[in-house]
Amino acid sequence: MVDKTKQASFLLQEDLIEDITKKIGKDNWLSVYNYTDIKNGHIAVFSALIPVSRTEEVIQGPAWDLSIGDGVPGFRYQGEKPLYERFHDLQKIEPFIFRQYFFGLKPQHTEVSEEFRHYHNLFNDALNNKYIHIDGDGNEEDVVILSDNNVQVHLHYLKQYLAAREMNLVVYFDHRRFSNLTLEELGDPPSDLVVNKDDLILVISLRNHRSGDGEYESFSRLLGKKVIQGYGIEKSGVWPFNEIEEGEGKFVSFVISTKEDGSLNEYSCDSSKLADYFGKNPEAPHYLTPVFFRSEVLAKYYANPKKFSVEDGYLRCGALWGLEIDNNHEKHVVAFLGDLGRSLSYNEQMYWRHYNIPPEGTISKVAWERGFMAEFTDPQRNDLLFKYNYEIFYDKWNKKIGFPLFKPLSDEDFHHIQTLRIPLSNDQAEFDNQILSLTKILVDSINEAEIQKLLSDKREGEKGISKLERYLKEQDVEEYTPHIAFLQNLQALRSTGVAHRKSKNYRRIAQVFKIGERDLISVFDDILSQSIALLAFLNTTLR
């Protein structure tokens, strides 16, 4: 049985009117374009920018001030002289959405105002059909989400843009619904309704009209517009009204020493309040006071190598920020107190504070020689030393032999060298991942095709390590056996412990590396030592 009350409410579009009046412009996301067929009707939303001074005029009537697809630049004549207009015949009303048509030869295309995208320096994530804003910490936030029939914009970024432009956004509506009952059968609902407020005008009209196929007997049209205002100019984010980010101007205090009574001594990392070598703030701790952190502080940065880079003595987030660190310390990560305040935002400082520990000893020998003695010093931690030696060996072999012994990693695999490290904790999953990475670098990347060209013959089924072994033998290289054995054991550890379920075969190879007799951090540190020895040995073959 047909519920005529619900049918009448549907035709009157009461749900859409409630959304427009109570939600649009108040939710975090605003639909600025929508053209969608729905059951028994369709929805049309468009939007444009208008000068604030024209708002009262525009809001007088429900009719749209432009049509979907308007906004193509063109010429008009001023007397006999052609005059170029950016928005042709739109009387200073700018489309915010541009809908392009290509005569059925190419797919239609929907785009958001280029000025809006440039104003916020939005990245086009074409793969996911959205535009992204990257803040000063490297954090990403969706600003525009696109689909074929719908475009949504984050309201905060829109309001900033409107403030800078000193304009308002007008959202236009043209929603239609159909019923298979006549208005008389629906109890004669009011045929013309008007909702008129300071920022809103809506007109809904109901009519009896039989569709060509006889399916519908009546329809309604909801036509109107709503004005979205921007922030005040002081929140536009543009100089000199740059919006102050949360925590800006605030500084975290870090533990810098332990007092005689066992309590901890903390001090702000605000560099303007610290002592220096020129007599500033003589009673305060020095800018170069070392601050200690658990090594796990770097886990966040290793986990996202596309954004962060943990290097020998330096941590960076793209070109946004960088922090000098002492990651050559035997147990911890150390940074200078003043650098923490100068290089990190308040939010990043808060993250580092979580891993802050009382000082244990002093900075590493490497950090001392580089930073205070101005001496060039190789890294001392095996993960950093391996990467350093690997790059040198890669270039040296390539120049001497004519090809790299280890093929360069693909873009999809490059993170294996970026994130290679001594495990930050005694965790099996992290250990397995590091074994996988090292095997990719030293075993899977052996340049079999080029080595084969240097061998006396080709043998069926011979793989990378075996080809390398035969190459060394044919070159009369001595004492290569332990290094080849190391590569074979490393490959076996990966095959039995990472690529497959751990079984008896894994336990056998685990004994070779003394897994179970000591912690996994020490095991992998020793594996890196053997890897460094391998590179040093291969270097000797080039002399």
Image (cartoon, rainbow, N blue to C red):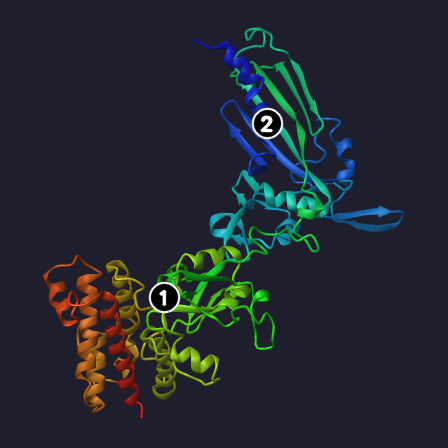
- Report the side of 323 relative to 441 (left or right): right
Q: Is residue 299 left or right of residue 218?
A: left
Q: Is residue 261 above or below residue 244?
A: below
The percent position of residue 468, horizontal first and vertical second, equals: 23, 80
Residue 405, x across and y down, in percent: 31, 79
Q: At 28% across and 82% down in the image, what residue appears?
A: 453
Q: Nearer the viewer, residue 345 or 60?
A: 345
Residue 186 vertical position relative to residue 319 in the rendered view, above or below: above
Report if residue 208 is visible in the image: yes
Considering the image in quadrants, where does the C terminus appear? bottom left
Q: The N terminus lies in which quarter of the figure? A: top left
The residue type indicated by label 2 comes to Lys
Residue bearing mark 2: 22
Quarter of the rendering containing residue 507: bottom left
**Dot 2, how many residues are within 10 Å of its Cα: few (below 14), some (14-19), or many (20+)?**
few
> What residue occupies the far front of the structure in this picture?
261
Q: Is residue 429 left or right of residue 384?
A: left
Q: Is residue 389 above or below residue 337?
A: below
**Nearest to N terminus: mark 2 or mark 1:** 2
Residue 160: x and y, percent? 65, 46
Disc 1 element: loop
Residue 518 location in percent, x, y? 18, 68
Front residue (pair 23, 355)? 355
Rendered residue at 26%/81% (across/down): 534
The residue that label 1 is drawn on is 419
Q: Can the viewer see residue 98?
A: no
Question: Label 1 is placed on what type of residue?
Answer: Thr
Element at badge 2? helix
| Residue at image location 21% in from the left, 81% down from the top | 483
